[in-house]
Each structure stands twice: as structure tokens, then as C-alpha cells.
Image (cartoon, grey):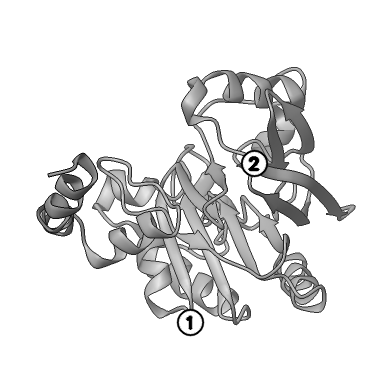
Amino acid sequence: MKKEEMQLENMPNVLKKIKERYTEQELKAIAEGGRIVPGYGPVPVIDFEGDRIRFGVMSDTHIGSAFFKPEIFESAIKEFKKEKCEFIVHSGDVFEGMSNRPDQIYHLSHIGYSAQLNYGRELFSLWPGKIYFIDGNHDRWFIKNTGAIIVAELIKELPDAEFLGHDNGDISLKGKAVLKLWHGEDGNSYAVSYRISKVIESFTGGQKPGMLILGHVHKQAYVFERHVHAISAGCIETQSDWMRSKRIPVHVGFWIIDVWVNDQGISKVRCTWYPFYC
């Protein structure tokens, strides 16, 4: 028997073993070019016609904080619709939480898990399409204190939302390029670009994404480093009293990003920042 015939004869057993190991959703992700990472869910694959896709980016909304601005959030949703974004990504700190600092309780517009969760559902229901979330350190206050995963709970009543994980999560663009959302628990650096560069340096060679969208520090920037298109996502919260006391400025606004994808990955990007002067 020829070697090729032996390989074909063994294929049913190989396929059976693969099917036993993965769920139907995971198999679909593999078939479409997504990655399966041990300990995580399958990487969702976004397919689209042509070579370009447009999406909206927001981060650090801090819903429940007195410094969250619903009018800016609503402006972002309106612009995403107007510009025909295919989906939205959110890079963490969706909610404010309760007491990361001793005085935080005095700077809340919505106090408690239920109040913040219900307000978040009301706001994100304004977007009718797909939205991908990760959580951030403020969201995880509820995990640490009550065991509740508030962002995972948020998506249950949204029309088409997906929770990608704690602090980071991946999306596959046509099976050709990885878009990574990242939050972190580090702090601000002396230059916005320095933080971005150090995060990129932390990825081992085979784990670098084609595009990295970072939350947490409330800054906006675009940096191309080690062949990674990196966007610091800004925030939808004005400068808090705590950030002012630490002399930490904030960049309030959101992004709309166009990405071109070919067989080698991301071939071109166009990033538009929408600032708000608060």
C-alpha cells in the first residue's frame, strides 16, 4: 500500500479523535483559522467580504462613576452607526466597581452591582450589532468581593455580545490576523508610547498579535512596534479627582479603525480618533 493511501485510510480515526477533543464551536474556529488556546474559549473568527473591515473602539467607560459621560458614550454609538462599523471592541473597565480606593464611594453615580449592571445594559443596548468585551481591574472588584463576573453577566441580555476573558482576549480577522484586546494592571508611563512598547515586548515571538488595543491608562495613541499595530484606546470618563491628584491627564474619546487584511496578515490600517474636550 502506498504511503498516501495509508494516510487516507487513517483519516477517519484521526478526525474522530479530533472531534472527541473539541466542541462544535471550537472545531468551527479551527476550520476558519482561529486559534485554540489551552484554558481559554475558542477565538472568534470575523469573516468579511473583500480585504477591509471597519470597527469601533472604546475603553474605560467606568459606568457607575460620577465622571462617566453618557452623552459621550451615546455620541460614540451614533458615530459607529453612521460610519457603518461592523462591530465594536471594548478594552476593559466597563464598570467602575465600588471601592478600589477609600473615597471612591463618594464618586459613584450608581452604587452597587445591580445598579451598575442595569445601567450598563441600558447603554449597550443602544448598539444593535456585535460587540466584544474584556474586563479590567475595576470590573474585577466584583469578582474579588462577591464572586460575580459582571461583564460576563452584562452580555446575557445584549443582542449580540461576547465576553472574551479577563484582562485580555483575541479575535481572528478572516483567520489571517489576530486582534488582541488588553487591559493590564500596570500604571502610566512617562510616555504613552513607552508603555505600549513594553507590553509588545512582553509577548514571545509566536504570540504577537497583528493588532493590539490597550485600555487601562486612559490615553490615546497609535504605535507601530515589532510589526504590531498598537492602539491605546483612551476613555469615556473625564479626569477623576484621584487622577488629578496624581497629575495624570486623560484622553477622552473613541476610535474608528479600518483594517486591510491579506494572506500575510494586516496590510494597512487607518485610525481615526474622536476627541472630546471636557
- 259 or 273: nearer the viewer: 259
Label 1 packing within 10 angstroms: few (<14), some (14-19), many (20+): some
In the image, 62: left or right of 102? right
Q: Is residue 159 above or below residue 83?
A: below
Q: Position of residue 229 (x, y in %)?
A: 71, 37
In the image, 110: left or right of 246? left
Name the residue at the right extreme.
277
Name the residue located 56 percent from the left edge and 80 percent from the top edge.
Answer: 125
Q: Residue beneath label 1, please?
A: 159
Amino acid identity at mark 1:
Pro
* Discs 1, 2 touching: Cβ within 8 Å: no
Label 2 packing within 10 angstroms: few (<14), some (14-19), many (20+): few
Q: Is residue 143 above or below residue 189?
A: below
Amino acid identity at mark 2:
Gln
Q: Quadrant of residue 25?
A: bottom left
Where disc 2 sits, the SS reads: loop
Q: Position of residue 14 (x, y in %)?
A: 15, 51
Q: Quadrant of residue 226?
A: top right
Of label 1 and label 2, which has the lower sequence position?
1
Q: Position of residue 11 (x, y in %)?
A: 17, 54
- 77 or 69: nearer the viewer: 77
Q: CA distance from mark 1 to mark 2?
A: 33 Å
Name the residue located 72 percent from the left edge and 72 percent from the top edge.
Answer: 77
Residue 210 is tagged as: none
Where disc 1 sits, the SS reads: loop
Q: Residue beneath label 2, please?
A: 264
Name the residue located 20 percent from the left edge and 40 percent from the top edge.
Answer: 3
